[in-house]
Amino acid sequence: MITSLYAGVAALWFTVLSLRVIALRGNPIFSFLAFKNLGENTLNRAIRAHGNFAEYAPIILIMMYILETQNSSSVLLHAIGLLLIAGRLMHGICFGFMESNGALRVGGTALTLTALITSAVSLLA
């Protein structure tokens, strides 16, 4: 199944975002992920990267699964999956690992919303 590929990749990235938050909260086991720690602002941004992923990825993956069970085009499913993964990587890197990067933030948001809208419109068609 195509959706399972993207769900697996998404789960791995979600794990990285989770471990980054754990590291920034002071867990010594994951201290290698606590680089560029500028205090509370860094932690808050990492929490938002993690939370934002948790808000968008599940609904898109659910819609992908429904589309896949309806025998939608594999090209469409891969396009949605790639948009989702690229968008969430860009946004997660910007918020979770950097002080700021407008291009990654806007680009990641745009790709994610494109995946969301494409999925929704495809389900309604």
Image (cartoon, rainbow, N blue to C red):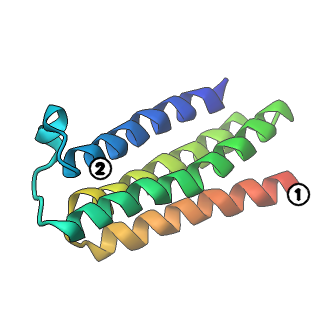
Q: Position of residue 117 (x, y in %)?
A: 69, 63
Residue 44 image position (x, y, % from top left): 31, 66
Judge by depth and name the residue closer to the eye, 81 or 21: 21
Residue 118 image offset from top left, x and y in percent: 70, 58
Instruction: State the residue position of label 1.
Output: 124
- Left-right relation of 98 to 120: left
The answer, for residue 125, to whether it is visible in the render is: no
* Residue in front for this viewpoint, 113 or 35: 35
Residue 50: which disc? none
User: Residue placed at 58% from the left, 56% from the top?
Assistant: 56
- Residue furthest toward the top? 1
* Residue at the spot 23% in from the left edge and 51% down from the top edge: 25
Q: Nearer the viewer, mark 1 or mark 2?
A: 2
Kindly state the secondary structure of the residue where label 2 is placed: helix
Mark 1 and mark 2: span between their CA atoms? 37 Å
Identify the amino acid type marked 1. Leu
The quadrant of the rendering that contains the C terminus is: bottom right
* Residue 104 vertical placement versus 24 (above, below): below
Residue 100 location, quadrant: bottom left
Badge 2: how crowded within 10 Å, few (<14), some, or many (20+)? many
The residue lying at 19 percent from left, 70 percent from top is: 99
Disc 2 target residue: 21
Of callouts 1 and 2, the N-terminal one: 2
Bin the neighbour count of mark 1 within 10 Å (Cα to Cα): few under 14, some 14-19, many 20 and up.
Answer: few
Instruction: Name the amino acid, label 2.
Output: Val
The answer to whether any part of residue 56 appears in the image is: yes
The one nearer the camera, 28 or 98, is 28
Q: Are marks 1 and 2 in contact (CB under 8 Å)?
A: no
